[in-house]
Amino acid sequence: MKLLLKKYAAPFWRQISLLVGVTVIANLLTSIQPIFLASLLGILGPTATPVASPLPQVGVKSALHLESLGEKARTWVEGMGGGDTWSSLWILCLIFGIVTLVAAILTQLSHTISKWIQARATKEIRKDLLSNYFNLSMDFFTAEKGGELLSRVTRDSLNTSMALGPLVRSFFHNGILILVYTIYLTTLSSKLFFTLLAIAALHYLVTQLLKKTSRKWAMKASDDTALLSASTQEALTSIRVIKSLGAENFEMQRLEKRLEKARQSEFGEANVVGLEPNLRLFIDGVAVIGLILVGGAEYLKHSISFDGFVLFVFVGRLMTVPIRQFATVFTWTHSAQGAFERISKLLSRTTSIPEGSTHKNSFNDKISIEHVSFSYDKEPVLRDVSFEIKKGEVVALVGPSGGGKSTLLDLLLRFFDPQSGLIRIDGLDLRHLATQPYRRLFGVVPQESLLFNDTLLENIRYGRKDATEDDVLRAAEIANCMEFIRELPQGLLTTVGDRGTRISGGQRQRIALARAMVSRPAILLLDEATSALDSESELKVQKAIDTVLESTTAIVVAHRLSTVTHADKIVVLKDGKLEAIGKHSDLLGKNPTYQRLHELQGARTPTH
């Protein structure tokens, strides 16, 4: 909790100071309201009441004694009213109304400030979480579920920020009221004050009994909600697959298990959350009975006046509210602490790809892959692979599925580092480079083109703020996109829908190619960019790719050999090993793996 306050409360110390000041003033105005009751009793009550001990006349106790304060206020009001009871009553009500109004305005202001602090802190926590997500390496995202990560950003950040503004306000709000009311009650009867101590002890006992249970259910509800979010996100993302397989009922049964777990944990959390205020209300009811009995006994023994008895019960009842709320604060604190622990674990995660310090902004000579090996969970994917990619070359990576082609692209983009061996660009080890400038050398077209729910214009220039509309049009022409863009009613301003579902697969792939080309990348990476397309779409995309390949360095992962027969260099990978390197005609005569791939696709692969 100290870390939470230091990191997310300290930047808002001015607002927190204002919050404390406004809260103090509002609560001082609220806390003087019992004085008006004391004055009212003096104006309307009996002229004399039996009391064993006279009111103190001098000293601190006289200054703070509630009946003495009421007497002074009554004398002042009666002086303003000319001694007339009805006029005095009106003046007292008018002053009380003004004090109550100002207290209400300041209380609302303190509430607004506390919510402002909470909202800003929530934003900063979410910003730090998202920033840390983006800085983590790809192995983190392959191990975590997206829905759970989303839940940390939404639910846990909100629960954590509650410990700032609202809890700070509640601490001062209730603390001041408890302090002032305690002074009132102590001046009326020090013996009766112990009744209030017993009430506080009961509330503390409830807090101790519930804190572990509350925290356990809050964490369970958060975890189960996160899992439900992850499963729901996965299902909605895969809705085409679900519907195409007629698996709606199957998927619903699978989700129902998550729904049931979420229901149980949310119900358990709600029960604990609902039980707490009701227990505290019961304690308050018992407290009022205790106040009446103890205060009544004191009055019957003539230890306090009748006015003192009424004031004691009234103030004691008032005091039960901040005691109850103050105790609830500690329950909130435990819930917020549990949420912050989960967030802290994520914020403490660091990337497995250390950031280099050298900024590489150009590609001048070659990329060298030197004896590179890589494994996923001790399962070898690449084994001692070595070759070069010279500037201006089109290099194709081919071979059976699982040979390590896409993994090699991931290593070139430095999503991962090799377990052994090196990758260099212009003689520089990738591990020594700053990742963002280096990756901006590349234009990447993945096998599945993912578009954002935005316009074609924004999708093409995504991440390239300096790209002008002319740059977008140039990239769209190169990628053979303009023929279908011109047919759209809104042209480049057409919104493509979630994941680009409003346009065809071939159109999406050409937009992805335009996005890769808009920044004039030094190196183009194509990861089986046409394998998921039909023949007509493949022809159009391949035509666009051929145009692009004429003027850039490119590394192409190819499933269909027909797309890479004119590559300057073809690298054959099988079972993670480099089998052969050469041109199409050379490999046909000497590499069995390439020959077999050619035979399987012979009807579509030219031999020249």
Image (cartoon, rainbow, N blue to C red):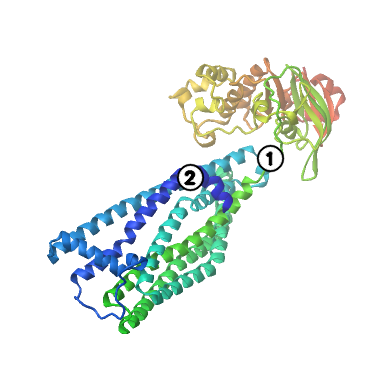
Name the residue at 52% across, 16% down.
470
User: Is 179 placed left or right of 74 in the picture?
Assistant: right
Q: Residue 58 at what x, y percent from top left?
A: 32, 68
Q: Residue 221 at what x, y percent from top left?
A: 54, 58
Q: Residue furthest front?
A: 58
Q: Secondary structure at mark 1?
A: loop
User: Is 467 placed left or right of 372 in the picture?
Assistant: left
Kindly identify which numbered label has been placed on residue 112. none
Mark 1 highlights which residue?
Answer: 351
Q: Residue furthest top?
A: 551
Q: Neighbour class for label 1 at 10 Å: few (<14), some, many (≥20)?
A: some
Name the residue at 54% across, 49% down.
5
User: Is 235 placed left or right of 293 in the picture?
Assistant: right
Q: Quadrant of residue 553?
A: top right
Is any atom of residue 5 visible in this view?
A: yes
Which amino acid, mark 1? Answer: Thr
Q: Neighbour class for label 2 at 10 Å: few (<14), some, many (≥20)?
A: few
Q: Does residue 289 lie above or below 215 as drawn?
A: below
Which amino acid, mark 2? Answer: Trp
Is any atom of residue 247 visible in this view?
A: no
Residue at mark 1 to residue at mark 2: CA–CA distance? 32 Å
Q: Residue 45 at what x, y percent from top left?
A: 20, 73
373 or 570: nearer the viewer = 373
Q: Does residue 95 lie above or below 61 as drawn?
A: above
Look at discs 1 and 2 and give the one toward the viewer.
Answer: 2
Q: Secondary structure at mark 2?
A: helix
Mark 2 highlights which residue?
Answer: 13
Image quarter (top left, top right, bottom left or bottom right) of the C terminus: top right
